[in-house]
Image (spheres, rainbow, N blue to C red):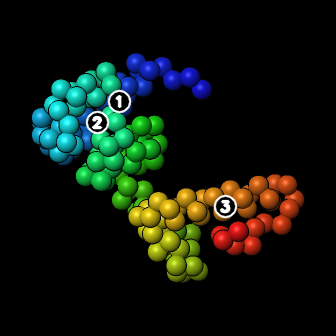
């Protein structure tokens, strides 16, 4: 899939402006909060450049922003909103009563990226084995 760079950068910049406006910050204040020069932040917001990994990390931690939302406009804007949506869905399906640790697992996966990666890796192996008619892997340790 080919991304039109100009449109993509502009869309990311527009989402950065949304974050800044919701936080009620000026561009200079936002740059200061992210630890970058105001001119660099301006270039990000107007779609000239893409924020570096350090800036993306700070955006996620300082503003609880989902990088999936910021970069790809997927999922809710805020990480807490995504977690609450999962919990609400679990409650609607009465999963919370059936699996009391699922709520904790979802919260832990949001906080611990290694745990999230390991569980998703296991699930990927599980689905691959299932598609191939094999016995699924017995544990996360394998």
Please give the label number shown on residue 50: 1
- x and y percentages locating residue 17 in the rendered image: 25, 34
- List x then y, in percent, for residue 110: 44, 62
Image mark count: 3
Q: Look at the image and tell me whether residue 66 can be seen.
A: yes
92 vs 11, nearest the viewer: 11
Q: Residues within 10 Å of mark 2 (few under 14, many from 20)?
A: many
The reply to whether discs 3 and 2 touch (Cβ–Cβ < 8 Å) is no
Direction from residue 29 to residue 66 in the image, left or right: right
> Which residue: 69% across, 73% down?
139
Figure check: 44 above or below 81: above
Among the two numbered marks 3 and 1 on one chain, the one whose residue lies closer to the N terminus: 1
Residue at x-position 44% and y-position 21%: 5
* Of marks 3 and 2, the one in the foreground: 3
Q: Is residue 11 left or right of residue 98?
A: left
- The residue shown at (48%, 65%) is 109
Q: Which residue is mark 2?
A: 16
Q: Position of residue 27 (x, y in %)?
A: 15, 33
Does 47 sit above or below residue 125? above
**What crowding class fits label 1: few (fewer than 14 Cα within 10 Å), some (14-19), or many (20 or more)?**
many
- What secondary structure is marked by label 3? helix
Residue in the picture at 74% in, 73% down: 138
Q: Is residue 69 left or right of residue 132?
A: left
Please rate how many residues cluster around mark 3, counting C-alpha atoms within 10 Å: few if below 14, some from 14 to 19, many from 20.
some
Per the image, label 1 sits on a secondary structure element best described as loop
Q: Which of marks 1 and 2 precedes in the sequence?
A: 2
Calculate the distance from the C-alpha at mark 3 to the C-alpha at mark 2.
33 Å
Indicate which disc residue 123 carries: 3
């Amino acid at each position: 899939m080919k991304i039109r760079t100009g449109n993509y950068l502009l869309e990311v910049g527009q989402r950065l402006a949304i974050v800044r406006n919701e936080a009620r910050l000026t561009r200079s204040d936002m740059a200061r909060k992210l630890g970058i020069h105001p001119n660099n932040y301006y270039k990000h917001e107007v779609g000239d450049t893409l924020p570096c990994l350090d800036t993306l990390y700070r955006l996620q931690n300082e503003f609880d922003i989902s990088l999936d939302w910021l970069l790809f406009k997927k999922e809710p804007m805020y990480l807490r909103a995504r977690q609450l949506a999962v919990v609400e869905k679990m409650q609607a399906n009465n999963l919370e009563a059936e699996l009391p640790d699922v709520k904790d697992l979802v919260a832990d996966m949001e906080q611990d990226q290694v745990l999230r990666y390991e569980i998703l890796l296991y699930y990927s192996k599980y689905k691959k084995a299932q598609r191939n008619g094999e016995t699924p892997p017995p544990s996360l340790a394998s």
